Image: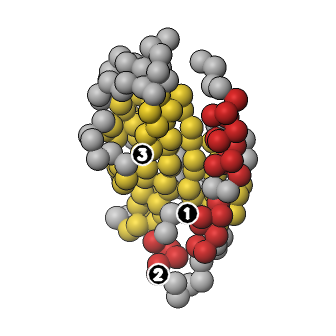
Amino acid sequence: MMVPDCVCLILCAVYTFVCSSYRSQNYINISSLLPHSQCERNPCPMESRSCHLAPKTVSFHYLSLPSNLQTPATLFRMATAAAPGRPGPDSLRFGIVGGNSRGMFVMQRSDRQTGELILVQGLRGPQDISVDVDMSEYSERTFQAKHVAKVHVLVSAYDF
C-alpha cells in the first residue's frame, strides 16, 4: 500500500522526537528504523520507586491498513525472550492501557511468551487511531519490568 509523501513526512516528523517526550524520565533512543522506533529507560537509582515502575522500554509502531479490513485481524505481536544464560520471566501479563475507548481492539495471549493486538471491529477510513499496549514481566510473582508499545494505525480511505 502506498503512503502519500505528505503522510510519510508527518510520520518522520513524529518519529524524530518520540523519545524526547520521555526525556524527563531518562529514556534514550535505541532503535531508529521506521516503521518503528524504540526507547529504553536508563538505569534507575535504587531509591526511586517511580522510576522502577515506569516502562523499561517504549516502542512506537506505525501500521497502514485498508478500509474495511476483515475482522478479527491480528495487527501486532509483543513478546519476550530471555538472554542466553539468563532465566526469563516466570509469567507475563498483556493488556491495552490506552486508546481503546471504542472497544475496537483486544489483547490476547497467543502462547506463553507472546501477546497479540487484535482488531475486532471493522474500520472505515480515512482515519488515524492510536492504541497503547503493555507487557509486564513477573518472576516468582514479583513485578520485574513493564514494556509499552504505542501503535499508531493509519486507515486508508480505500479497501485495497
The colour style of the image is secondary structure
Q: Earlier in the sequence, mark 3 or mark 2?
A: 2
Distance, label 3 to label 2, CA atoms, is 26 Å
Disc nearer the start of the sequence (1/2): 2
Going from N to C along the chain, the mark reached first, 3 or 1, is 1
Q: Tell me residue 132's x, y (percent).
A: 43, 49
Label annotation for residue 137: none
Q: Amino acid at mark 3?
A: Val
Nearest to the observer: residue 121 or residue 26: 121
Label 3 to label 1, Cα distance in Å? 18 Å
CB under 8 Å between discs 3 and 1: no
| Residue at 45% over, 28% down | 126
Figure quadrant of residue 6: top right
Element under disc 3: strand
SS for callout 1: loop
Determine the residue positioned at 64% across, 41% down. 11
Q: Are marks 1 and 2 in contact (CB under 8 Å)?
A: no
Residue for badge 3? 131
Q: Nearer the viewer, mark 3 or mark 2?
A: 3
Residue pointed to by mark 2: 49
**Viewer-side label of 3, 1:** 3
> Whole-Å distance between the Cαs marked 1 and 2?
13 Å
The number of callouts visible is 3
Dot 1: within a 10 Å radius of its alpha carbon, few (fewer than 14), some, or many (20 or more) residues? Answer: many
Q: Is residue 10 above or below residue 59?
A: above
Residue found at x 38% / y 64%: 140
The residue carrying mark 1 is 56
**Secondary structure of residue under mark 2:** helix
Residue extending furthest toward the top:
160
Q: Amino acid at mark 1?
A: Lys
